[in-house]
Image (cartoon, coloured by chain):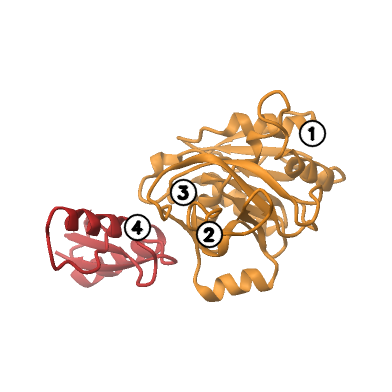
Chain colours: A red, B orange
Amino acid sequence: MKARVTVMPKAGVLDPQGKAIGHALESLGFGGVGEVRAGKVIELELTETDPAKAKQAAEEMARKLLANTVIESFRVEVV
Amino acid sequence: MKAAIVVFPGTNRERDMALALQRVTGAKPAMLWHRDAALPAGTDLVVLPGGFSYGDYLRCGAMAAQSPIMQAVKDHAARGGHVLGVCNGFQILCEAGLLPGALLRNASLRFLSMDCHMRVERTDTPYTSRFQRGAVFRATMAHGDGNYFADDATLDRLEGEGLVALRYATSAGEVTADANRNGAARSIAGILSPNLRVLGLMPHPENQVDPAIDGTDGLPMFESLAETLAAA
């Protein structure tokens, strides 16, 4: 079973990478792009076969290591 | 003062730190490997030096904060032991929960390798007793992620409890936006734990401890520690 953990900078936390990507898109001529936020996706291959337990385990991993909850929020999907 | 320096894979400033400590104590500090599970008996000060532990994978300091030696460092801090984290060491202290907040990517997105000045916010600490109050000293910064962040409530608490040790300033001691090159919240360069025994800072005071190399601007920090811990 696979879990996908999406880690994003929290609202209100400065995201200079997202800003730089936004500027680059603008200079490439893409119009109509508002705020850009950059995060990361971590895919986990889990031996757990129960989706609810897999999600719970991945959430625990995200809280302990994958995300720094001072500055980042996370979302777990079992896929 | 019995000092020990923790070396992680990717740490690269441990020898400069060892020279700075040796200069004030006359003794070579112990070098500990990240896999060690205990500190040498009688260790007064643990130093987490600068570098790029674990290649900065995931987040700066995130992997190092989980390594075996860090449990011993946490126990040492919980017993009231002294811990100094410089640059990557500061990032590790935050990731390990020994200091609040986090170090974000520099606001400019640029890696900053240059001298900066810091204003000493209080001199009644084990790290700053040899500085004059309001003193400004020069140190070298070399980091990509030194932009200190904490939520407003945490920042207010740090300020209210006098735990902001050092702020980026001009050479005249003025805290200005221009002097705050990495964009740190409230120009914070270094913070203390509530018992004043854990200090994390981004710039490298160990760069300036030898008159033959680049002056001795950073030496008072090490002299303060040696004086405070001499009797220990």
- Residue type at tag 2: Ala
2 and 3 marks in contact (CB < 8 Å): no
Query: Which numbered disc, 1 or 4, marks the residue closer to the eye?
Result: 4
Chain designation of label 1? B
- Whichever of callouts 1 and 2 sits on the residue coming sooner in the sequence is 1
- Residue at which label 2 appears: B177
User: Can residue A42 be seen from the camera position used here?
Assistant: no
CA separation in Å, label 1 and label 3: 28 Å
- Residue at which label 3 appears: B61
- Residue type at tag 1: Thr
Q: Residues within 10 Å of mark 3 (few under 14, many from 20)?
A: many
1 and 4 marks in contact (CB < 8 Å): no
Query: Which numbered disc, 4 or 2, marks the residue closer to the eye?
Result: 2
User: Is residue B6 or residue B20 the one in the foreground?
Assistant: B20
Element at badge 4? helix
Chain designation of label 4? A
CA separation in Å, label 2 and label 3: 27 Å
Residue at the (35%, 50%) spot, across then down:
B58
- Whichever of callouts 2 and 3 sits on the residue coming sooner in the sequence is 3
Q: Residues within 10 Å of mark 4 (few under 14, many from 20)?
A: some
1 and 2 marks in contact (CB < 8 Å): no
Q: Where residue B16 sits: x, y (%)?
A: 62, 30
Query: Which numbered disc, 4 or 3, marks the residue closer to the eye?
Result: 4
Quadrant housing the N terminus of chain B: top right
CA separation in Å, label 4 and label 3: 19 Å
Answer above or below: position of B172 versus A62: above
Q: Where residue A10 sits: x, y (%)?
A: 36, 69
User: Is residue B37 or residue A25 the one in the foreground?
Assistant: A25
CA separation in Å, label 1 and label 2: 37 Å
